[in-house]
Image (tube, coloured by chain):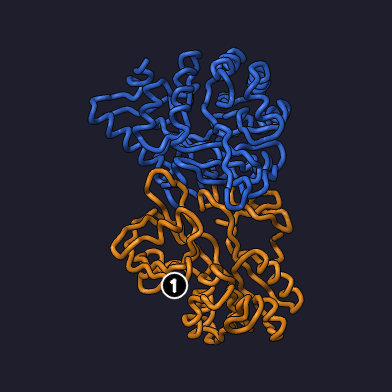
């Protein structure tokens, strides 16, 4: 049975701008999670009662790595945690990327990059081959790119061209004629739409990780749905739950 | 030995703690996180005659001390409920109350008819109060005559006891309560969520696509408690109290106000074990205060 547990903060490190890395003691989660899954982090102030879903960046030897952007009250609260503080956490939640053999391209955009790290690692560990990881940022304030190099050939893209390739990840992929059998992606919705189109062009199978405002995070409240191309077997309508049926979907299964 | 058993319209619950419709699925997802067999009962999501798609996202938003939701009553329809959910519910060791929704009185009747004689469903909760549906729902729960008619029509065909779930978005909830009792309701459950709103000042949009949503959580509790108290003193049928209950202390307030049972909703999102902890807390309170039977304290605050 999964329980909401109290986890100790090992460290909190600012990476760049409003992005920080939170490292937590969570052996129950690190031993079980799969690439693509997320955790729920709770505030205990009695006022902010909904947990925040955060993708798992990586987890090994009991240490859970979360890379978070400050976007609101909850993430701002997490950014102020220090070593030794306790935080309540539930997970791992959601489904995971289906890892396949073949040539793989990973696309990560901004704060969609963290979960692609454990994905690159999982693919590398499973197939002993480095994947291609195309990581997109607004400018040279990048993060995590070094971590990817162990598992992937990394192509950095910046919107303003100040580092690496100029342009967004899809523009760069087209320019460099990147091909592959399998695409794994996470990032802003416009990027994921680009991934969906691009994968159709090159005949690749694409999986995308989505996000949506959540309440329960476990599939019971139906708050976080995404439109599906076909009638979903659980809901009997064209809606799937991002927290439970996802967050990973095959790109052609969802309307984004 | 303390006795926490309560009875609603002839149905015995091992304790007065249930979970609210739309917050617990059919307990198969929740089974991963909590032990349903410790609860008095669960209430399943509102079922319509056909699958309903619900509202566009975003459907949920946090507010201080609670949340807003405008799910829009998405559900898979009664045929799927019977085929896919009832087999799961049959295996649960707790009382199952099925929430029923409809756009028209006739739609409620259609669902109630199909649920006839389904043994896994021990109680029906007729949802005339959901504030998110643009037709039918809000209107019925705010009109005593309509509420009376729907109660009567459901009672005509139901084999299970009929509990009417009341809306708080009214001037005088006791009017609706009395109308339902008059038409033969076996019990009442209240309150459903109160219509609220949140604006994102940076995006300059409503936080919820539907513009408004139902407020749930502790922010709702004082209003819910007041309405439960008023209703208990207006009718003779049992009342299931809900609205912002997060723990045993909250639950005991509602029981002392006169509720026969209580239901926990949003609290489960903050702690999947909220309902179980509420049961344990009630038992502890009874032991510490020499209360041997929960029925002794029902309505003790007048």
How far across and down, in percent of the image, does residue A163 sit?
A: 57, 82
Q: Residue at x 54, y 47 (%)?
A: A220
Along the line of sight, which residue is nearer the eye, B188 or A68?
A68
B119 in relation to B29, above or below: above
Left or right placement of residue B81 versus residue B104 in this view: left
Q: Chain of mark 1?
A: A
Q: Residue at x 55, y 26 (%)?
A: B168
Left or right placement of residue B249 versus residue A118 in this view: left
For disc 1, the marked residue is: A15
Residue A106: image quadrant is bottom right
For the colour orange, the matching chain is A
How far across and down, in percent of the image, does residue B226 sit?
A: 45, 22
Along the line of sight, which residue is nearer the eye, B119 or A124?
A124
Q: Is residue A18 visible?
A: yes
Q: Badge 1 local density, few (<14 within 10 Å), some, or many (20+)? A: some
Q: Residue at x 72, y 75 (%)?
A: A198
Left or right placement of residue A10 versus residue B138 in this view: left
Name the quadrant of the N terminus of chain A.
bottom left
What is the tally of numbered marks visible in this picture? 1
Secondary structure of the residue carrying numbered label 1: strand
Along the line of sight, which residue is nearer the eye, A36 or B131?
B131
Tint applied to chain B in the drawing? blue
Residue positioned most to the right: A201
């Amino acid at each position: 049975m999964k329980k909401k547990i109290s986890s100790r903060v090992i460290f909190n490190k600012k990476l760049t701008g409003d992005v920080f890395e939170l490292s937590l003691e969570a052996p129950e989660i690190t031993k079980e999670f799969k690439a693509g899954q997320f955790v729920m982090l709770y505030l205990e102030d009695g006022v902010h009662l909904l947990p925040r879903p955060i993708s798992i960046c990586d987890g090994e030897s009991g240490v859970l790595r979360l890379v978070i952007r400050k976007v609101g009250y909850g993430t701002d609260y997490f950014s102020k945690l220090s070593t030794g503080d306790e935080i309540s956490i539930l997970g791992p939640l959601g489904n995971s990327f289906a890892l396949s053999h073949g040539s793989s391209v990973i696309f990560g955009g901004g704060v969609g990059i963290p979960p692609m790290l454990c994905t690159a690692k999982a693919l590398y560990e499973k197939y002993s081959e480095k994947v291609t990881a195309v990581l997109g940022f607004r400018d040279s304030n990048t993060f995590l790119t070094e971590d990817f190099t162990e598992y992937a050939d990394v192509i950095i893209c910046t919107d303003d061209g100040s580092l690496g390739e100029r342009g967004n990840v899809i523009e760069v992929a087209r320019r460099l004629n990147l091909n592959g059998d399998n695409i794994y992606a996470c990032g802003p919705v416009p990027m994921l739409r680009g991934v969906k189109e691009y994968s159709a062009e090159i005949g690749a199978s694409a999986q995308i990780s989505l996000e949506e405002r959540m309440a329960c995070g476990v599939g019971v409240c139906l708050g976080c749905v995404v439109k599906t191309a076909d009638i979903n077997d659980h809901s009997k309508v064209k809606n799937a739950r991002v927290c439970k049926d996802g967050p990973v979907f095959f790109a052609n299964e969802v309307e984004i | 030995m303390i006795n926490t058993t309560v009875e609603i319209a002839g149905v015995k619950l091992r304790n007065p703690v249930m979970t609210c419709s739309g917050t617990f699925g059919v307990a198969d997802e929740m089974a991963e996180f909590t032990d349903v067999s410790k609860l008095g009962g669960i209430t399943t999501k509102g079922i319509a005659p056909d699958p309903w798609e619900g509202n566009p996202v975003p459907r949920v938003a946090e507010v201080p001390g609670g949340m807003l939701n405008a799910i829009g009553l998405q559900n898979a329809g009664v045929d799927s409920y019977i085929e896919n959910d009832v087999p799961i519910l049959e295996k649960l060791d707790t009382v199952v109350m099925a929430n029923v929704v409809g756009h028209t009185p006739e739609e409620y009747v259609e669902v109630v008819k199909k649920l006839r004689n389904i043994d896994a469903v021990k109680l029906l909760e007729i949802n005339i109060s959901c504030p998110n549906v643009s037709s039918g729902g809000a209107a019925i729960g705010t009109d005593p005559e309509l509420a009376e008619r729907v109660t009567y029509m459901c009672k005509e065909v139901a084999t299970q006891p009929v509990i009417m779930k009341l809306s708080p978005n009214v001037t005088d909830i006791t009017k609706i309560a009395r109308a339902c009792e008059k038409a033969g309701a076996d019990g009442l459950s209240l309150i459903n969520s109160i219509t609220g709103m949140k604006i994102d000042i940076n995006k300059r949009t409503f936080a919820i696509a539907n513009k408004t949503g139902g407020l749930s959580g502790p922010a709702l509790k004082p209003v819910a408690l007041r309405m439960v108290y008023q209703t208990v003193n207006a009718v003779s049928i049992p009342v299931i109290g809900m609205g912002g209950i997060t723990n045993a202390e909250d639950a005991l307030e509602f029981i002392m106000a006169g509720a026969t049972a209580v239901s926990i909703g949003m609290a489960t999102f903050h702690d999947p074990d909220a309902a179980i902890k509420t049961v344990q807390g009630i038992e502890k309170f009874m032991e510490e205060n020499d209360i041997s039977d929960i029925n002794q304290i029902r309505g003790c605050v007048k």
